[in-house]
Amino acid sequence: MSLRVFGLAPVCILVNSAAFAEAANPIVTELDLESTIVVMPLSDADGPIDPEPALAEISLNATSETVLSNGVRIRARGALRLQRDHPNRPAGLGGFGDELIAPVGIFSGLASSRPERDSKMRTRLETAYLQVDGGYGEGRIGKDQGVAARFFEGPKSVLSHARLDSTLLDPSGLSTVRSRHNLTGPSLKASYTTPRLLGVRGGVSYTPQANADGLDRRPGSGTGGFSPETENAIELAVNGTRRLRQSGLRFDVGLAWSRADVTNRGLRAPYSNVETWSAGTRIEREDWTFGAAWLESDNGLPSSAYTAWTAGLHKTAYDTDFSFEFGDSKDEGIGLDARSLRFGTARDFGPSTRISVAFLSDKTSFLTETWESQGVVVEITLSQEFSQVTGN
């Protein structure tokens, strides 16, 4: 099945070239570079996983698009990322026990195996898709997130990478709250989303094999080198938005469901289909934003449900952003119960520099043990568009 997907690549290139050749407008290509550094100068930890004082990521992004004579927009997008995350939590995977071999939760990526350290700098092509957008909706094919993740609604954070929900760079090594419905990661997939009608749009994604070794998600992978196989993943999602003019309130809502086949590949674990549900909302009024999200997954194993929820408040005042977030996650398969908190502020210094400062607290209870980490994090993001080419 994967061969058939890869076999579409030359076809996509040909379609892309032919479409660009018929463009009514020039082809605009943009390249930009973004780098993020997360520093934890002050920390206090209790447990076998120590905080990392400095983490970083560099992302090179490219977008090329044009509009055909019939109004259809064609876009190609790619992103190459270089990252150093917490060595105990590559791509969000984590061992929180002392077993040599243990099954991993398909969605949570957590297991009762021993924590492993991987200090390597990792580089991945996280995004590479072709998009066609017209009056009948939007289609995408390639390496991309599914509609369940794209339609996510929830709390706003002043942190982009050290955020509470689905952390991209985890300085404490204990962040396990994941209410963003990203089951398949950047695996090759095809997606379709409808036009927005009366504020509502729907979407569907199909992933033949969820085997991507991404920076933030490695679906079906586990600790100790043992992992099941996840395939034939289907995602359905709905997103709605509504603004009440008299009160000034704006409501955004996202609902999603996903299902995938799981094969144990000889592992001694009763894997079956994995099913996940999620819901989230964001309510805005003037400079205030309240957000909340919830997710539940059976993790592809009996009696191993993973649940997570987050809630937060965001305020903008005096050209400065403030946010407070709180979240909770439980993994019944390994007996893990975790709580996380973020409170911080952020400000833009010119068009290309953003600095965030926040207090971080992650607490994880596993069976009879409690691991905790807290401290101050500083997140510095530098972005620059260094090339824009317009041509035929």
Image (cartoon, rainbow, N blue to C red):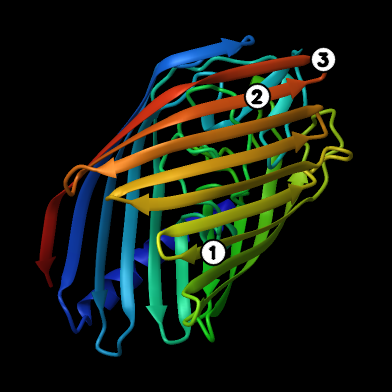
Frontmost residue, 328 versus 195:
328
Q: Residues within 10 Å of mark 3 (few under 14, many from 20)?
A: few
Between discs 3 and 2, the one toward the N terminus: 2
For residue 218, say whether it is visible.
yes
Q: Is residue 21 left or right of 180 when viewed as pictured?
A: left
Q: Nearer the viewer, mark 1 or mark 3?
A: 1
Residue topped by disc 1:
283
Amino acid at circle 2: Lys
In the picture shown, does residue 34 fall above or below 236? above
Amino acid at circle 3: Thr
The quarter of the rendered structure image containing the C terminus is bottom left
Q: Secondary structure at mark 3?
A: loop
Residue topped by disc 2:
363
Q: Which mark is residue 306?
A: none
* Residue at the bottom extreme, as displayed: 70
Residue 38's quadrant in the figure? top left
Between discs 2 and 1, the one toward the N terminus: 1
